[in-house]
Amino acid sequence: EHLSEETKAYIQSKVKWTQEAALSYCKHMNTDFAIAEGGATGPTFHPEGMKAGFAVLAVAGRRSGQDEVEILAQKLVLSTHGDREMNMRLYADAAAELCVEAMKITNPSIEMKSEQPDTQQEVQSTNVTDKLYLDRSSHLRSDAEVMKELYNRLDAQHVIVKGASEVLFGSDDQLSLPTLEQPFLGTLFETDDAKKEAIENRTFLGRLGDEQTPLFAMYLPEDTNVSSDSNSSYFANTRSRAPMLSPLHNEIALTATAYVNWRDSHRFCTRCGSPVEFVQGGTCAKCTSGHMAWPRQDPSIIVLVTNAESTHALLARSPRHPSYLYTALAGFVEPGENMETAVAREVHEEVGVNVNHHSINYISSQAWPFPQSCMIGFHAKTNAADGLASINIDPEEIVDARWFEKEAVYLAARDTDMMGAVLDRQVVEAQQANGNWTGSLLVPSKGVLARTLVDHWLEE
């Protein structure tokens, strides 16, 4: 009742579109069911004046014993805010409920059964996703007494970083965060001296949630192995696997990796060459001459380039990517250069295409400590007169680059979501060996900024 007439009309258009899309897909693809979603997640909205997100969901299918496709269920979900991540979870939950409702309509005899989760496990899961957050507590780092107390807390949790590129996982979407009280932590060290050194050289990352539990990064050598009694914990590559983590644990993994790699590469003062010690919870390097230095992030741009009509996207593959993975263009911002100029320069240097400077729009950003970047994401379009501009790649940077139709990118994103960590070649090769995927194009996984840019374009 508080919505403007323009907003109501916009929602109504999504009601009609989701019905038509679900019916068309189910009919032409000959599927048992098809679900369509249309709406807005935030934080920006169209039409102007919208303050909160919404989604219209429609499920099409065939009733038992009938060939005719019909809309089985439809739902309007109204949010109270413009938080993109929270809205996407809200809509996904609503979609799952609507699918169950549709299945009951097609076959009333279906009895939907689910195991009752263990109460303790359910509470832990809720805490991780709903109640925990990282308070970096930077104001405490210079307080020696407080830091000493936090370092001595036996309930402090730890992000275990092995070498420069792996962290300890507890499951596919959660890190393992052992405390000093847990015997498992001791199994990671060959000697007591090695354990003592690792504990003394921890980096304070902040405090978790309302309980303010201290959180530290702990470094282990590259050749560390997890024992058989590790309670299913395992080391995995941060770059390829961290995007599969929950948003909080992804942030924690990247933060810990950034600090560990910074400390490893800054053992001597960059001004005078003197040895350094790490102070303020390990977040500051102080040399014997008194010079102090803190970690930094190098600004880098990443941009999804589309044609002026936004029907095609220009995706590229670098030498480090598998043959099936195409992504957005990226590069470092040079000294004295602004972000928009860097976007235009990098696109021209890497693929020989000119973008319309007025079309360059900021989308989002992401820390990317590989080695120490902060990625700033953009969408840019070519000039209308150029059509699908010819591509001339820089072979030093790019192996291949092509224009892809929106439908092809959509299908690639769908296949990517089915497989998960597609940067890990073994994950994809296993799906190919099982005959589950016979395609040739995948895009980065959700949780990676390049994928955020792709999804933003697909949702237009």
Image (tube, helix red, strand yellow):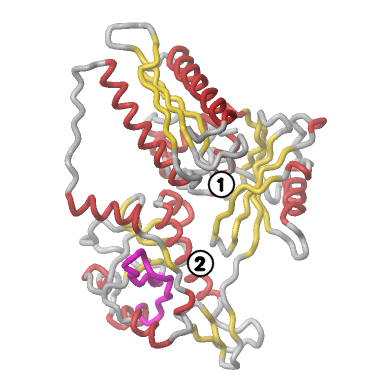
Q: Does residue 366 belong to the magenta stretch?
A: no
> Residue 346, percent across and down?
73, 50
Amino acid type assigned to the residue bearing label 1 in the image = His
> Residue 453, percent across and down?
59, 43
Foreground: disc 2 or disc 1? 2
The residue shown at (56%, 63%) is: 371
Q: Secondary structure at mark 2?
A: helix
The residue carrying mark 1 is 321
Amino acid type assigned to the residue bearing label 2 in the image = Ala
The residue carrying mark 2 is 258
Q: Residues within 10 Å of mark 2 (few under 14, many from 20)?
A: many
The residue shown at (43%, 67%) is: 135
Q: Please, is residue 190 above or below residue 56 in the view? A: below
Residue 235 shown left or right of residue 112 in the figure: right
Q: Which image quarter is the C terminus in?
A: top right
Residue 200 shown left or right of residue 11 in the figure: left
